[in-house]
């Protein structure tokens, strides 16, 4: 268990939070925390992406194998962030029970992988899929804060977020979940953890599907209203033109 690495990771994320607080002193604590979350999302996706796709081993075929040094490092960095963010959420009470359960499950899963020294490859794979959409989620929040969410950029971010969540976290996540459950090397407790994370992914997917349906329905209604206004303006223009023609003939 790399205790020192985890401690340094927590301190590092806390220092980054304080640094953002100094730079963006006019913003609130949530702004700074979300900047840390955005930074973690980018860093950990790059790190776990390298671990999963380049350094190896492949999580779909080597679930339950011994952790490599790079896997251990990536898990320690991620664990430090989740401990920092969980403490922040408890302090400011900004998240609901589902997100808190996700944080707790993530911490327990990483702790188990680090303490037992196995299942690092599939844990890194799960982290990659889970955090891939996180920068987009934070971007949505920042766009709302600066008044740019109701724009083409906001629609593009939402569309990409929904697409990646459905294809990677649920689609690819289902394949990884199956491989972990059927692997003879994976311990029972890690399989239970995989079930918990998979169920939480579907809970989030249902909420995202509802959000996507409501937003697309609202966009369609707005489009219908705009089309109706265009037709009314066109008819008004034709009516005014006919009136001008009649007045010209009368004169």
Image: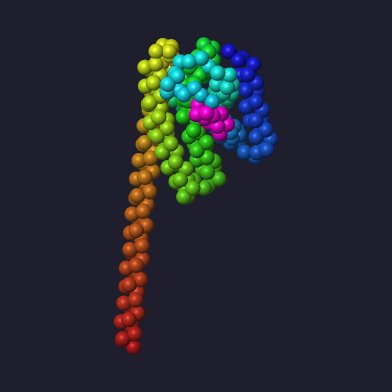
Question: Can residue 101 be seen at all in this image of the molecule?
Answer: no
Which residues are drawn in magenta? 42-54
Q: Which quadrant would residue 183 be assigned to in this image?
A: top left
Residue 63, x across and y down, in percent: 44, 18
Residue at x 52% of width, y 43% of height: 143
Residue 28 quadrant: top right
For the point 58% across and 19% down, the residue is 69
Does 99 sit left or right of 44 as displayed? Answer: left
Check the image and report above or below for 90 versus 249.
Answer: above
Q: Is residue 212 above or below residue 81?
A: below
The residue closer to the viewer here, 214 or 168, is 168
97, 131: nearer the viewer: 131
Total numbered labels: 0
In the image, residue 150 above or below residue 79: below
Q: Residue 225: image x %, image y %?
A: 35, 55
Position of 85 relative to 20 (above/below): above
In-image side of 92 versus 227 (left or right): right
Looking at the figure, which quarter contains the C terminus?
A: bottom left
Residue at (31% x, 86% y) in the render? 249
**Image quarter (top left, top right, bottom left or bottom right) of the N terminus:** top right
Magenta segment: does it hold 44?
yes
Between 171 and 155, the one nearer to me in the picture? 171
Please give the name of the residue rendered at 37% of the width and 21% of the height, measured from the top-left corner.
178
User: Of helix, strand and loop, which mostly describes the magenta segment?
Assistant: helix
Determine whether, in the image, residue 102 is placed left or right of residue 247: right
Expressed as whole percent of the image width and height from the top left, the position of residue 88 reads 57, 25
| Residue 119 appears in the figure | yes
Where residue 55 sits, quadrant-wise, is top right
Tell me if residue 188 is in the magenta stretch. Answer: no
Q: Residue 64 at what x, y percent from top left?
A: 45, 15
């Amino acid at each position: 268990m790399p205790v020192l690495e985890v401690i340094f990771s927590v301190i590092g994320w806390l220092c980054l939070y304080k640094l953002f607080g100094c730079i963006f002193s006019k913003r609130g604590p949530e702004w700074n925390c979300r900047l840390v979350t955005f930074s973690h999302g980018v860093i950990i996706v790059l790190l776990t992406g390298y671990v999963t796709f380049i350094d190896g081993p492949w999580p779909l075929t080597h679930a339950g194998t011994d952790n490599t040094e790079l896997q251990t490092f990536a898990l320690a960095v991620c664990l430090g962030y989740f401990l920092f963010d969980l403490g922040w959420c408890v302090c400011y009470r900004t998240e609901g029970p589902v997100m808190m359960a996700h944080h707790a499950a993530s911490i327990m899963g990483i702790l188990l992988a680090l303490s037992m020294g196995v299942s690092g490859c599939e844990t890194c794979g799960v982290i990659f899929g889970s955090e891939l959409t996180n920068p987009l989620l934070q971007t949505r929040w920042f766009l709302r804060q600066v008044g740019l969410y109701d724009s083409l950029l906001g629609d593009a971010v939402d569309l990409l977020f929904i697409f990646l969540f459905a294809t990677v976290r649920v689609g690819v996540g289902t394949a990884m979940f199956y491989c972990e459950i059927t692997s003879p090397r994976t311990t029972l407790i890690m399989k239970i953890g995989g079930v918990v994370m998979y169920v939480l992914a579907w809970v989030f997917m249902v909420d995202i599907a509802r959000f996507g349906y409501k937003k697309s329905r609202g966009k369609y209604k707005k489009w219908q209203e705009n089309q109706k206004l265009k037709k009314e303006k066109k008819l008004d223009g034709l009516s005014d033109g006919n009136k001008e023609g009649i007045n010209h003939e009368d004169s």
